[in-house]
Image (cartoon, grey):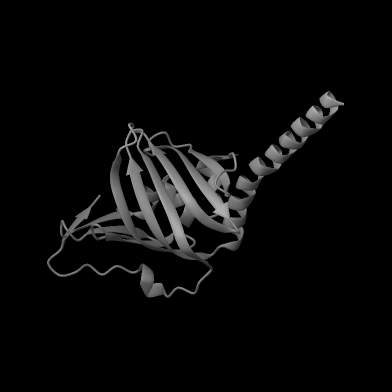
Amino acid sequence: MHQLIKKIVVSTFLIASQFSFADGVASLRDFFKNTNSMRAQFSQVVTDTKGRKIQDVEGSMQLQRPNKFRWDYAKPYEQQIISDGTQVFLYDTELQQVTVRELSKALGSSPAALLAGGDAVEKSFTIKNAARKGGLSWVLAFPKDKDSGFERVLLGFKDAKLRKMELYDSFNHITLITFDAVERNPVLIDSTFLFTTPKGIDVVGE
């Protein structure tokens, strides 16, 4: 009888594990199918190989698929990353400099492509289910481009909304992004994703 109960417990655990692993990819595909825009507050923490915190920033983000996005970093320094669907503008207020890149070159297999790109994401990434943790459904993405700068990206979903991202780069740094006050499909105005270079600011093209 003891062995029978043990087998039932093990079987139940395995079935539950299969379901928890299956949620991630389904959540990502639902994100691309049913999320046309997104708005949220975020916190971003970067740690090195020894677990030491080397960056801790906060801000807000807005996304309009396909390929339009805006990330405003507010603390402890101000920076903007804006895509109008054709070009990406990186504005560093401290350096008084704007870097402009073509969207196709700026995205590629970058984590931004996972969020702002079209539903053909699996052309640029290998997608796999990941273990459920922290009450979130996770999906693991490996960039097919070996020069992307990232080895893997984890995305955590809950209630059809993106809640966390974990990015592991080629320097073994870990970037954890936590999204709060997440709005799914808010109405965003076009000017949100337009960048006008302030007077006296240096513009650098890549």
Position of residue 134 relative to residue 32, above or below, is: above
* Residue 80 image position (x, y, % from top left): 29, 61
- In the picture, measured across the screen, residue 96 lies left or right of residue 27, that is left
- In the picture, measured across the screen, residue 111 lies left or right of residue 54, that is right
* Residue 66 image position (x, y, % from top left): 48, 60
Extreme residue in the front direction? 2
The total of numbered circles placed on residues is: 0
Q: For this rendering, which residue is in front, 90 or 18?
A: 18
- In the picture, measured across the screen, residue 171 lies left or right of residue 95, that is right
- The residue at the point 78 percent across, 28 percent down is 6
Q: For this rendering, which residue is in front, 195 or 135?
A: 135
- The residue at the point 15 percent across, 56 percent down is 95
* Residue 63 image position (x, y, % from top left): 45, 63
Question: Residue 7 falls in which quadrant of the image?
Answer: top right
* Residue 79 image position (x, y, % from top left): 26, 59
Question: Residue 159 falls in which quadrant of the image?
Answer: bottom right
Extreme residue in the top direction? 3
- The residue at the point 75 percent across, 31 percent down is 10
**Residue 84 visible in the current orientation:** no
Q: Quadrant of the N terminus?
A: top right
Position of residue 102 relative to residue 128, above or below, is: below
